[in-house]
Amino acid sequence: MKRALWILLALQAVFSAPLPAETRWERSARKKQEITKDVVWPIHEPLMFYLRRGTHAEDWPQIYERQHAPDNVKRMAEADVRLLRLHFYKGFGLALETPEIANSQKMADLMHSYGMKVSLYVAGTLFAETFYHEVPEARSWEQRDQYNRWVGYQAYGTQTYRHYPCPNQPAYREYLKKVLKIGVESLKADQIFFDNVHLIPEPKSCRCPRCLEAFRQFLRQKYPTRDAASRGFGYPDVDYLEVNEWDEFSRPDALTNIDDPVLQEWVRFRCESLARHNMELYEYVKSLNPKVSVGFNLKGLYGINRMWLNGVYHPLFSGHCDFTPFDVTGMDPRIDPHTGALISEIRSYKMARRLNMSCDDSLADDLNCALYMAFNYQKPVPGFGHQGGPWLRGASNVFSPIIEFFREYNERYLTDVDNVADVAVLRSWPSMAYSVGSTLIPTILMEQVLIQHKIPFDILFDEQLDRIGRYAALILPGQESLSKDTIDRVLRYVREGGTLVFTGNTADYNEWREKRRVNPLQALVHSDGLAAATRSEGKGRIVYIPEIIPAQTRRTGSRASEENPEIAASSDSRSQRFAASDWVLPKNHQEIRGLIVDNLPQAVSISTEAPLTTVMEMVNRAKSRETIVHFVNFDRKNKLRPFGASLKKQFTSNVESVTYLSPEFDDPQPIEFKETSGRISFTVPATQVYGMIVVRYKS
């Protein structure tokens, strides 16, 4: 009887207890969800594509019609939707697609009347069944493999009717310019997005007569003298050279390293051909209207060699790409339940920022949203605005409390900022391009140490070596192939006061992947290659870490979790992939962290007591004299407990205030702090997913 009474009283207490107060972010999200509950969100694919492809609902034509309806657009505008991507050109041919382009034209006009921005989709494949009927000469525009067969789309079913155009065919670009002119001048596009921006992996690379002649011209320009040709290939004339062919004995998936000098140059040629093709389209759009934001589906940095597989080398697009999506399945942020690996796109964000590109991703998930807003670079595009905010393509139809929080504070705290980075990781071209898979392992694991130990860092490429003087330390994680010029520049940086950290077989090879008799970096630290070593060099220091020890053996037979069929190789060779599920902190991660931090010329810019399941990004906003620190908790099961943090002052004046902002609170929360010896110390409150610390300095 007493037990029953106790249960009754307990239940009464539970049901009579006041419900937690609803935050204003929750109210805003709920209101917009109600406004848009019957909205049909526009799809960037035309109706004819769904009907030709199959795998669609039987009422898809009605759904397609509904997305263009005026009242549908009006509801989106009422919910403060600011940009939508519309179907525009898929590759069927302008004549056939004109009726559907007309639908987008009407919708674009209506969107503009509501003050919304219009993004137009442009695909990168040729639909052989229709396009060649409309433009018969276009058959000669497509890629052809070594057997003179067309090169087709290799993703999502049996779309063999989609062929890839040759990047060295100017006639195709001229056709696309006619398409783009309509989009920019008639539909008044605010943004153009190019899809399918990659090449198909070997053995399906294009070897049409155009490409082979362009490759010969590429070699002639790079090796203009008999001496240069002889040094590179053994022959005095590059016209002797031929690109290899693949067969059952010479298989691309069997390669672990690219040692053939002609194949090395073929990899670079493919990357430059693809970039040059798209740069011309970028410049053409900007010539029509410089206010248009232009993006390419380059995707990001993963556990596969994109240069070798897909001809994508991101630095070649710098200055000719305003944004890129990630668009890769399996890379959603999480802690892998089987391996404990912390998986994220942080590398891609960091790469894009230093290449002056914004990223574009889905923000439907709270953790993904927090990472995007914390790490993404919001590129200012004159006349367009900031590319990459919480209203653009990846967030247009998302109404959650966390994104409403970011919409409130985006312009105030997340634009016009630059990240703080104490160290830089160099991904050198010959090391990353000519090692098919093995160099990815130490590189990714070193970056994982920096991410989880919250050491502020950037990712650089050879083209950015002139930046290294901005960093306290430069890290070369297993960068096996380095030119003498690169080594000389790095050592000058050290002698002028920087710290060099290198690991494993860094500098064992030169830029042609020829084995050095003596490793010049190991010789400087007098290393036997077995134990860590440090030494002073000029005003700086050199730190050698013999091995980044993986925490586990890579699981045989497993495919990389980030593997997207559009960018995957044609086979399942484990030597060519480092699966995201294997991105586990190395066994010696604490030692690596200590060797880096303890050898910096000055103390690390921020140190925290946050667990390894938390990531951090620190930025400065000069126009408002603020330092902003983002913390993101990957542990979905447990709220982050309060933890201490100490950061180096970023401005010369005293600190005016420290505040904490989070979607868990309606308003900023003041934080107590101490300011001593050029550092600011405080405690970060308990955090569910995301918290922002704002340090404001006195004017």
Image (tube, grey):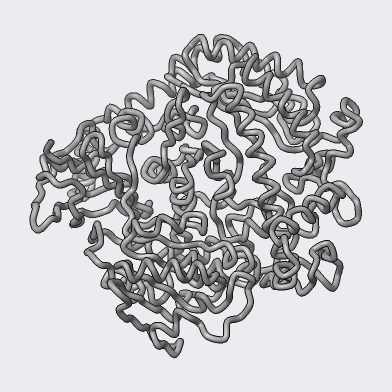
Side of 647 where 143 appears, left or right: right
Q: Is residue 254 visible?
A: no
Looking at the image, which residue is at 74% across and 62% down? 571
Of residues 76 and 456, the one nearer the viewer is 456
Which quadrant would residue 185 be assigned to in this image? top right
Question: Which quarter of the rendering shows the C terminus?
Answer: top left
Side of 484 where 185 appears, left or right: right
Vertical relation: 511 (above or below) 366 = below
Vertical relation: 328 (above or below) 396 = below
Side of 577 where 677 appears, left or right: left
Looking at the image, which residue is at 68% across and 25% down? 180
Residue 280 drawn at (x, y percent): 66, 36
Q: Is residue 269 visible?
A: yes
Residue 581 drawn at (x, y percent): 52, 62
Of residues 224 and 194, the one nearer the viewer is 224
Residue 130 drawn at (x, y percent): 86, 29
